[in-house]
Image: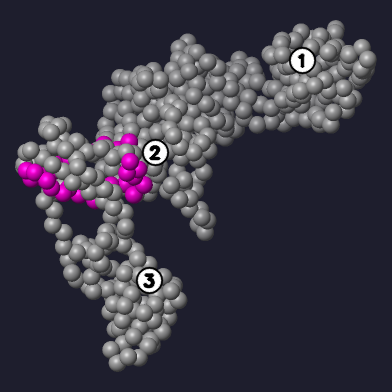
């Protein structure tokens, strides 16, 4: 509902078929000794507390008929800085800003006049008693209003003193008769009651030694705004089925539901985990992009280290309307990154017990699925060598039959420094399956030892051989020794090993090992 600011006039607005009241009212006269002028310069620094890839589509494209998340649940915040020309009077004066974000944190507001630091803020107030139908009706109890009703093809109106607005509208007309009205179409109020405002407003009581036009700076923190990174990757097979190349590009998405628009703003994004005294908000979002960002001639993002974080500054101004989502390229596509396909058989997953597990059957069901991954090295030799932002990575592959890109999986990554490996899970292999079974188990509780023999079968139904990594948690106890394993293994941690094996095309590979536990 838009509320024009013409003083002391009355107007009404027609309603649809609902019990809510729609109306238009007008603001009262306002006289301040200070005034805000034009020529605003806005800058935003946006932080995010979103889990990578965890932003639901409802935040930026509400599902028809579905519930729209509240702006206060948007996982992020921003620092807003605005430089504006203001007209000040010598001595004490009052100054109002009435186009601030609706989700402002008033405890973070700061007002300064950089050219005249002697301008003092005596008081600052955040006024948010916004006009609404319910508040107007409460303010007009025992006061006259006019209610219009649809009658046939026309309308009639009833004017009287408002006695109640809880269940319909109850009026007492001039002749003393009582009217209980439902199904009204509009309500007319004579004026906007004192104390109600149409926009969230910051009000300062100032003491200034100078008068005239001054350049003031206002900064504050607001919720309802966040950002995250999305990656698009295209995988192409290389010299064999286990190796290939990856083309990678990245975009930044910004959601603004803060209650304010930011035209032609200077934009910065902060990457890192910035501590705040708030309720736990899971993991913060991070950001970074390509090595040539600092030299982005097209006004793209430039990156630099900032304290313990990374700061990304857009080299051009951008407009962030309220209730909108904007996407900006984070870095241009990096091509031909060496990548490797991985198949991992992890039949049991992470398992660990605080005491020796001596039961023959611990009740853990072994899976048969072999997971499919693609991984690459975030190194300069690969064309990257940069800290990558946390975000969601969508992977596609070219179908040579018709030249189309087909989606093959997605995964989320955390903040990844340079020279680290990125591993993306794409799904489960269709033509490669695993089978794990216990062949033998012996326990001697008196002597404090037990032995278990395991057999793992991998079957490959593809027309080419594949490499599979087999993960085995030695969960029964931390003191163990492998006896005569069929294949070489590597120790990943105190209770985890893995085997790297090649499974022939249309063939089977068997791994066996016996493990001795003691305590």
Q: Position of residue 235 (x, y in %)?
A: 55, 25
Location of residue 511 with respect to 172 vertically, above or below: above
- Numbered mark located on residue 77 in the image: 2
Badge 1 local density, few (<14 within 10 Å), some, or many (20+)? Answer: some
* Disc 2 secondary structure class: strand
Badge 3 local density, few (<14 within 10 Å), some, or many (20+)? Answer: some
Magenta segment: 79-107
Query: Residue visible at 28% across and 52% down?
Result: 127
> How far apart are the alpha carbons under marks 2 and 3?
33 Å
Badge 2 local density, few (<14 within 10 Å), some, or many (20+)? Answer: many
* Overall secondary structure of the magenta section: strand
In the rendered image, which residue does mark 3 sit on?
Answer: 21
Assess whether residue 423 is covered by the magenta stretch.
no
Q: Quadrant of residue 458?
A: top right
Location of residue 120 with respect to 415 vertically, above or below: below
Q: Who is closer to the viewer here, 80 or 89?
A: 89
Q: Position of residue 37 (x, y in %)?
A: 14, 46
- Residue 322 in view in this figure: no
Q: Position of residue 488 (x, y in %)?
A: 76, 8
Lower position in the chain sequence, tag 2 or tag 1: 2
In the rendered image, which residue does mark 1 sit on?
Answer: 478
């Amino acid at each position: 509902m838009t509320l024009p600011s013409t003083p002391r006039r009355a107007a009404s607005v027609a309603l649809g078929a609902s019990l809510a009241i729609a109306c238009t009212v007008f603001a009262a006269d306002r006289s301040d000794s200070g005034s805000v002028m034009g020529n605003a310069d806005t800058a935003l620094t946006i932080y995010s507390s979103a889990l990578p890839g965890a932003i639901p589509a409802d935040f930026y494209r509400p599902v028809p008929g579905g519930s729209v998340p509240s702006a206060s649940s948007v996982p992020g915040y921003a620092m807003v800085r605005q430089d504006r020309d203001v007209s000040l009077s010598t001595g004490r004066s009052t100054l109002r800003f009435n186009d601030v974000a609706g989700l402002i944190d008033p405890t973070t507001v700061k007002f300064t006049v950089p050219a005249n630091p002697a301008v003092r803020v005596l008081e600052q107030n955040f006024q948010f008693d916004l006009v609404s139908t319910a508040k107007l009706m409460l303010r007009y109890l025992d006061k006259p209003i006019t209610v219009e009703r649809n009658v046939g093809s026309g309308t009639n109106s009833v004017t009287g003193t408002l006695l109640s607005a809880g269940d319909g509208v109850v009026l007492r007309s001039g002749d003393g008769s009582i009217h209980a009205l439902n199904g009204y179409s509009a309500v007319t109020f004579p004026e906007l009651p004192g104390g109600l405002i149409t926009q969230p407003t910051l009000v300062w009581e100032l003491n200034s030694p100078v008068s005239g036009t001054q350049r003031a700076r206002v900064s504050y923190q607001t919720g309802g705004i966040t950002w995250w990174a999305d990656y698009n990757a295209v995988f192409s097979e290389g010299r064999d089925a286990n190796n290939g190349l990856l083309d990678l590009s990245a975009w930044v998405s910004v959601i603004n539901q803060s209650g304010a628009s930011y035209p032609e703003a200077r934009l910065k994004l902060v990457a890192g985990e910035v501590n705040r005294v708030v309720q736990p908000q899971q993991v913060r979002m991070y950001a970074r992009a390509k090595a040539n960002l600092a030299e982005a001639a097209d006004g793209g993002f430039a990156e630099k280290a900032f304290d313990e974080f990374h700061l990304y500054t857009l080299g051009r101004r951008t407009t962030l309307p309220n209730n909108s989502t904007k996407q900006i390229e984070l870095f241009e596509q990096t091509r031909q990154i060496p990548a490797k396909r991985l198949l991992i058989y992890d039949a049991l997953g992470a398992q660990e017990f605080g005491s020796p597990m001596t039961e023959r059957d611990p009740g853990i069901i072994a899976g048969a699925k072999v997971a499919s991954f693609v991984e690459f090295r975030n190194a300069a030799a690969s064309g990257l060598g940069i800290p990558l932002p946390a975000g969601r990575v969508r992977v596609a592959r070219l179908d040579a039959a018709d030249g189309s890109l087909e989606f093959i999986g997605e995964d989320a990554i955390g903040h990844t420094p340079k020279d680290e490996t990125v591993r993306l899970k794409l799904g489960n292999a269709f033509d490669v399956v695993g089978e794990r079974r216990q062949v033998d188990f012996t326990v001697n509780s008196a002597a404090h030892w037990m032995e278990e023999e395991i057999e793992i079968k991998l079957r490959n139904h593809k027309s080419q051989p594949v490499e599979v990594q087999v993960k085995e948690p030695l969960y029964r106890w931390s003191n163990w020794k492998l006896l005569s394993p069929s294949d070489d293994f590597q120790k990943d941690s105190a209770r985890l090993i893995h085997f790297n094996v090649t499974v022939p095309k249309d063939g089977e590979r068997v791994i066996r090992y016996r493990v001795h536990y003691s305590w």
